Amino acid sequence: MRRAGSGHSLRWALIKAAVAGTTMVALAFLIPLGLMVQQTARDRAFTAAERQADALGPALAITTDQDAIARALASTDAGARERIAVHLPGPAASGAVVGQARADAPGVAAASGQGRSFTVRVSGGFALLQPFAVEDGRVAVVEVYVAESDLSRGVGTAWLVLSLVALVLVAISVLVADRMGARIVGSARRLAAAARSLGHGNLAVRVPVEGRQADGAPDELREAAHAFNAMADRVVHLLAAERELAADLSHRLRTPLTVLRLNTASLGEGDAAHATRHAVAQLEREVDQIIRSARRASDDAPAVAIGCDAAEVIRERVGFWSALAEDESRRWQLAGAEGPAPVPVQRGDLAAAVDALLGNVFRHTATGTAFAVDVLATESSVIVLVGDAGPGFADPAAALRRGEGQGGEGSTGLGLDIVRKLAEATGGDLALGRSAVLGGAELRLRLQTRPDGTPSRGARRRRLRQ
């Protein structure tokens, strides 16, 4: 589902379906009903004309005197509006006519000869011709005029009322569909919000499946909510088991570390012995940090990010690796780490990342290969460049894939992946390329210091060469 306002939401789809369905049903009923009303108005007009003609039947049965017939016409409603006439039989072909006649002679003659009533088209409407038997077996024809407007009287009002009824039905269906859609969409949005919250690390989020918030939700969404809650519980269980496993595995390292620390005490004095003891102490601290982090529950995590000075950490770690570099006759240089370079990562995590970058140089290049570390602080990020004079990366893409790396004995292939995740946690990245100065491999670690910032183009890299 897309976000609200996209024009293709489930709620809008339900409204359109309700409008289409209700409109079709309304048209299926209202159009025949309107046609029936129109036919009823037509029949009503001709029925009224027949009644007007029948009202003259008794008078014609008594007399055919024109004056008497004229008085009888005047007493009728149609006669008062000059809409009725009587064609009397006489010696002439057409006979005498009393009233306002509109029908032609052939129509009157047909009605008289056939002895039944029928209608003929006249100017402005229709004429009903009704024959009546008079004295001496002759036939008189009563003509009643039916105007065109009488045939559609009330039809327009009926169509208007039916149209309003159709609109009211559509409006009611839209309202009902909107309310139903609101409940369904609300349940779907709560499920989507819970999924996003879980994806952002809130392991305590759950979707309500009972109560007021879940009222009106279809069974399918309730089942999805149950499945989501079960999945979230499973994720919490798996993470807890993973933390316990990491803590247990890290705790198993304490025994060999203790033996190693005791053995380093017997190495005596010297730079190599001091560096070895320092490395063992650092390793012991890292194992303790792993155990504490694994044992700590997610709700005990710090509320705010802990930062550190990247320049200070890099100076310390480069100084640590410099002793090994001198033993292997490696030339090295550090540039750009004089001033402060704050980054939003923990000191231990950054130190581990720098050690992974420098350890990658010592592990995958020959003894005596030079390396350089450059630090570039911009307005929105801190960039660390680690280059060497080795052969470079045979496959940079594979080197960044977790568990692959450059392989080799003693390499797990996880170092660069750990560095990449640290960079991406700040909004930065890790890139692999070729060093423009030393000609070998170059790793570019970018730590974002401002979420919406962009690197400054005016910042220049500074180098301090030994």
Image (spheres, helix red, strand yellow):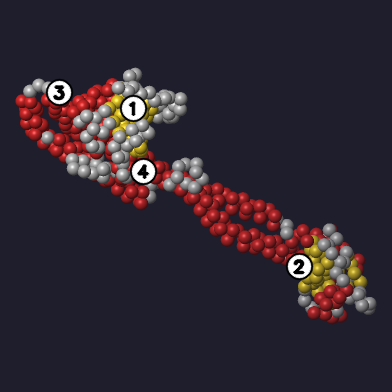
**SS under mark 3:** helix
The quarter of the picture where residue 368 lies is top left
Q: How many marks?
A: 4
Residue 287 location, x and y as percent? 16, 31
Q: CA distance from mark 2 to mark 1?
A: 111 Å
Pair 2/4: label in front: 4
Give the percent coordinates (x, y) of residue 310: 31, 24
Q: Which residue is mark 4?
A: 191
Label 3 near label 4: C-beta < 8 Å? no
Instruction: Examine the rendered structure and indicate whether residue 118 appears above or below residue 288.
Output: below
Q: CA distance from mark 3 to mark 1?
A: 26 Å
Mark 2: few/some/many CA within 10 Å (<14, 14-19, 20+): some
Q: In the image shown, does 52 or 284 lie closer to the viewer? A: 284
Residue neighbourhood size for the residue with mark 3, other residues' Cα within 10 Å, grouped as few (<14), some (14–19), many (≥20): few
Percent coordinates x, y for residue 184 in the rendering: 41, 46
Is there a contact, CB below 8 Å, between mark 3 and mark 1? no
Q: Dot 3 corresponds to which residue? A: 271
Of circles 3 and 1, the one toward us is 3
Instruction: Look at mark 2 in the image and give the residue it sits on.
Output: 50
Identified at 76% across, 67% down, the residue is 50
Q: Is residue 265 left or right of residue 89?
A: left
- Between 140 and 176, the residue placed more toward the observer is 176
What amino acid is at disc 1?
Asp
Marks 4 and 3 sit apart, C-alpha to C-alpha, by: 60 Å
Label 2 sits on what residue type? Glu
Q: Can you tell which mark lies on residue 414?
A: none
